[in-house]
Image (cartoon, rainbow, N blue to C red):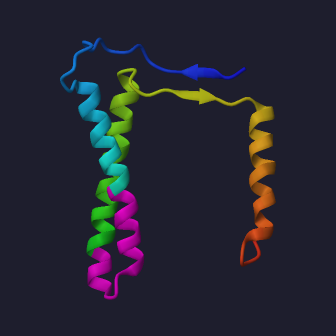
Amino acid sequence: MTQKIQNPAIQIPDTPQMTDRDYITDMLTTEKYLGVSYAVAEHEASHDSLYQIIHSVNNETSQMQRQLYDCMFKNGLYSVEAADAQQLQQSYQQHKGYESQFPYKTMN
C-alpha cells in the first residue's frame, strides 16, 4: 500500500468562480507547457545567441514551475505517493527493459 504525502490543505470555498487553487493549477499547467515548448525551440535554435536566450528563458520557466509546485505542495494542493522498495524495483526493471530500444549503448 502506498502512502500519500501531503500537507494540510488550505480552505478554498467551493464556488463556480475560479478559486486560488484553479489559478495556481492553471499557472503550473501553463509553465509545464512553456517548458516543453522552450525545450523544443532550444534544441532547434539555428544560432548560438538565439539558443542562449531561449536556454535562459527555459531555465527561468523551470524555476517558476518548481516554485509553483512548492507553493501548491506547501498548501496541500499537490500530493505525492511514497513508493516502497518493491515498487521502486519494479519500476527500475520496467525501464531497464527499455534499454534494448535505445539507438545507442548505455553506460553501466
User: Is residue 1 shown left or right of residue 40?
Assistant: right
Question: x and y percent of residue 92 in the render?
Answer: 76, 48
Q: Position of residue 58 (x, y in %)?
A: 33, 62
Q: Residue at x 31, y 55 (%)?
A: 61
Viewer can see residue 107: no
Quadrant of the drawing holding the C terminus: bottom right
Percent coordinates x, y for residue 56 in the rendering: 29, 66
Asked which quadrant contains residue 8, the reply is top left
Residue at image point 77% right, 75% down:
105
Residue 92 located left or right of residue 40: right
Could you say which is closer to the camera, residue 27 or residue 56? 27
Residue 83 appears in view: yes
The percent coordinates of residue 3 (x first, y second) are 64, 20
| Quarter occupied by the N terminus | top right
Residue 48 position (above or below residue 96) = below
Q: Which residues are magenta?
A: 34-52
State the residue at coordinates (38%, 43%): 66
9 within the magenta span: no
> How many numbered discs sit on the rendered protein?
0
Residue at the extreme left of the image, as rendered: 17
Residue depicted at x 29% and y 39%: 26
Name the side, left or right, on which 29 lies relative to 81.
left
Q: Residue furthest front?
A: 16
Q: What is the chief secondary structure element of the magenta stretch?
A: helix
Q: Quadrant of residue 98?
A: bottom right
